[in-house]
Amino acid sequence: MSIDRDYPNLARKPEDAIPSPELHGSNAIATLAGRALLANVGIPLDLNWLQEVRVNTSAVERRVQTQVARRTVKKEWQAAWLLRAISCMDLTTLSGDDTDERVRRLCAKARQPLQQELVQKLGIEELGIKVGAVCVYHSFIETALTALEGSGVNVAAVSTGFPAGLSPLAERVAEIRRSVEAGAHEIDVVITRAHVFGGRWQALYDEVATFKQACGAAHMKVILGTGDLLTLRNVARASFVAMMAGADFIKTSTGKEPTNATLPVSLVMVRAIREYARQTGMAVGFKPAGGIRTAKQSIDWLAMIKEELGSSWMRAEMFRFGASGLLGDIERQLEHYATGRYSAEYRHPIA
C-alpha cells in the first residue's frame, strides 16, 4: 500500500513530507519512526492511490497468527498492559432499554473503573486510572455530561442514523449538529456501506467530509462497518477515503453487525493509518469495537498497535477499545495478580 505522491498542501520532497519534531513538536499528537505527526485535517481525494491499494489476505492472516501465538506478557508487565487497556476503553451503552440511571451507573464506573480495594492492593492510587470516554445515544448526552463533570472522561455520542446509517443525509448531519450543541466531545458516525460496494469513492469522501464539517471541534470517529464490507481491500480503501476526508479516528464496527472487530481487519486498518501518516504527516486514531471480551484479547490489540504504529499510539488520544464487556475480565485478571485468586464475575459489574 506504499505509494509516493505529492499534494499541493504538503512539502514536495519525500524527506520533508512529514513535519519534524523540531518544527512542530508543540503541535504533534503522535510520532512515527521518530517524526512528529500533526492532527488530521484531510487531503483531496486521490483516486489513483485507491486504485493501487492491494491487500495480501494470506499474508495478513499469517501475520496475525504469528502475533497471537507468541508468548504473552506476564506478572507485573501484564498488569501494566491491562491498566493501559482500561485507560483506552470507551464504556458504551447503546441498547433500546437504556435509561438515565443506567447511564449514570456506567459513568460512575468510568470515573472509577477498578474497585478501590483492588486499587489499593495494586498500589496505583496515584495513577488515577479512568477510561477514555462514555459512549451513549444523543438523548443521554446531558445525563452523561452531568455525571462525568470534572472527571476528564469524554462523552461520545453515536450519530448519523446509527447503526445502519441509511437515513437521509440532511437528517444525519442535523443529528451530528444537535449532539455537538448538546456538548458531546466525540461523535461516532456511520458511513454508507453501499458507497464502498459500488466503488463510489467520491460520494463516500463527500459524505465523511460533510460529517467532519458538522462535527466542528468535536473529534469524529468514522465507523466503517467492516463486517459488512466483504473484502480486506474494501476495508483498506474505505479507511483511506475516511482519512482523506478528515477522520480523527477510524473504527471497525458499530458492535451491531454479526462480525465485528477482528485482528486481520484491524491489521489492515492500522497499516492504512501508518501509510497515511507516512504520506501526509498526519496521524489518525484507531478503535476496534465489538467482540473483544477477554484481557488476553486486549493485549493482542495493544501489541499490534505498539508493533505497527509505536508507543505514541498506545493512549486514549490515539487508540480506543469499544468493548464494555472487556472491563470485567480485566478486573478479574488484575485481582488474580494482586491476590493469587480469581474472583467471580458478578463481583465486577459495569452497569
Image (tube, rainbow, N blue to C red):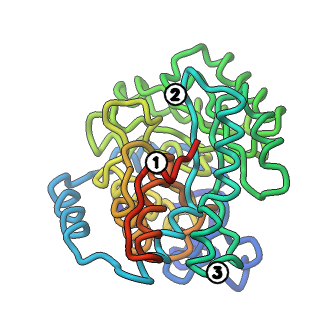
Q: Position of residue 67 (x, y in %)?
A: 25, 69
On screen, residue 85 versus residue 101, left or right, reads: left
Q: Left or right: where does residue 72 sit relative to residue 330?
A: left
The mark closer to the camera, 1 or 3, is: 1
**Position in image of residue 19 (x %, y %):** 64, 74
Judged left or right of residue 68, residue 256 is right
Pinpoint residue 53: horizontal percent, then vertical percent. 33, 50
* Pick the front one: 248 or 44: 248
Q: Secondary structure at mark 2?
A: helix
| Crowd band around label 3 with a 10 angstrom C-alpha radius: few (<14), some (14–19), many (20+) | some
Reply above or below: 109 against 300.
Answer: above
Please tell me whether mark 1 sits on a helix, a strand or a loop. helix
Distance, label 2 to label 1, CA atoms, is 47 Å
Q: Quick one: SS at disc 3?
A: loop
* Farthest residue, direction top: 168
Q: Which residue is mark 2?
A: 203
**Dot 3 corresponds to which residue?**
20
Q: Is 282 drawn above or below residue 110 in the view shown? A: below
Task: Please report whichever mark, 2 or 3, sits nearer to the chain's N-terminal start.
Answer: 3
Q: Position of residue 296 (x, y in %)?
A: 34, 63
Residue found 61% across the figure and 69% down from its top: 117
Residue sitting at 43 percent across and 62 percent down? 332
| For marks 1 and 3 on the same chain, the one whose residue lies earlier in the sequence | 3
- What is the C-alpha distance between the residues marked 2 and 3? 34 Å
Q: Nearer the viewer, residue 110 or 245?
A: 110
Q: Amino acid at mark 1?
A: Tyr
